[in-house]
Image (cartoon, grey):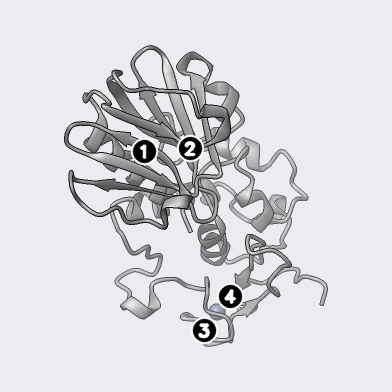
Amino acid sequence: MPEGDTVWRLARQLHEALAGKVLVRCELRVPRLATTDLSGRTVREVVARGKHLLLRVEGGLTLHSHLRMDGAWRIHAPGERWRGGPAHQIRAVLGTAHRTAVGFRLPVLELVRTADENRVVGHLGPDPLGPDWDPAEALRRLLTAPDRPLGEALLDQRLLAGLGNVYRCELCFLLGASPWLPIGRLSDPARAPALARKLLDANKDRPARRTVPGARPDRRLWVYDRADRPCLRCGTPVRHTPPGPTPDARITYWCPTCQPGPTPEP
Ligand SMILES: [Zn+2]
């Protein structure tokens, strides 16, 4: 699942492939952008903001995309077979003379003026991987509703931008707190933004995400996706909430021993 580290790495790969180059091919296969053609424009830069991608081209335009659950951008050399899904799932094709970036299943794809980017990302809280990371502001935002369950607050992109379900489960574990503990009752709430930064930063160059130091390949995460298996710290079976009615309903994983506090209604 794409989280802030994945999107940061993707932005860097897209930047390396496209920035400074002129687009010679542009197909935006969503109804609203069907007649938009960016070819002839130079790509200025590609940056991540939380889990959002901003591809800025000359002329003051930004192509904004978001991967949500399973969107993807793939970069191809000329003549290379496109990977990433069947053709009908392609939403964007951006080609230079040397590389072609193809966006698959992008649930969000829109063009905004670069000067108006705030319209699409202005609501986001501080980004642990952003150049303007501000842990004090992230903490202030996280504590604005002290009664909110920790696990829920960590997913709220307006408070802290970039965490998805994997990191929020792992962060709750590393904070030693139940995901349902009111965030205001954390003994040291400043550790939440500090750990978010540490985890995202440590993983932004790693294709296989890891929160357990020096972990074996099959033990890279403390609790995420370890339902009913022994907690890597204490051996208690890891608990999880039931899967929701939709594929994007997030399952919470936690160790009831290492993470004391409230538990959800049965
Ligand atoms: Zn445990």
Q: Position of residue 12 (x, y in %)?
A: 29, 40
Residue bearing mark 4: 258
Q: Identity of the amino acid at label 1?
A: Val
Q: Dot 4 surroundings within 10 Å: few (below 14), some, or many (20 or more)?
A: many
Separation of disc 3 and disc 4 at Cα? Answer: 7 Å
Residue bearing mark 1: 93
Q: Name which of mark 3 and mark 1 comes first in the sequence.
A: 1
Quarter of the image where the C terminus is located: bottom right
Q: Residue at x 41, y 13 (%)?
A: 60
Q: Residue at x 66, y 67 (%)?
A: 178
Q: Comparing marks 2 and 4, which lies closer to the viewer?
A: 2
Separation of disc 1 and disc 2 at Cα? Answer: 8 Å
Q: Position of residue 192 (x, y in %)?
A: 54, 51
Separation of disc 2 and disc 3 at Cα? Answer: 50 Å
Are circles 2 and 4 on residues that touch, CB within 8 Å?
Answer: no
- In this view, the residue in front, 62 or 126, is 62
Mark identifier at residue 234: 3
Q: Identity of the amino acid at label 2?
A: Arg
Q: Identity of the amino acid at label 3?
A: Cys
- In this view, the residue in front, 29 or 2, is 29
Q: Residue at x 50, y 56 (%)?
A: 70
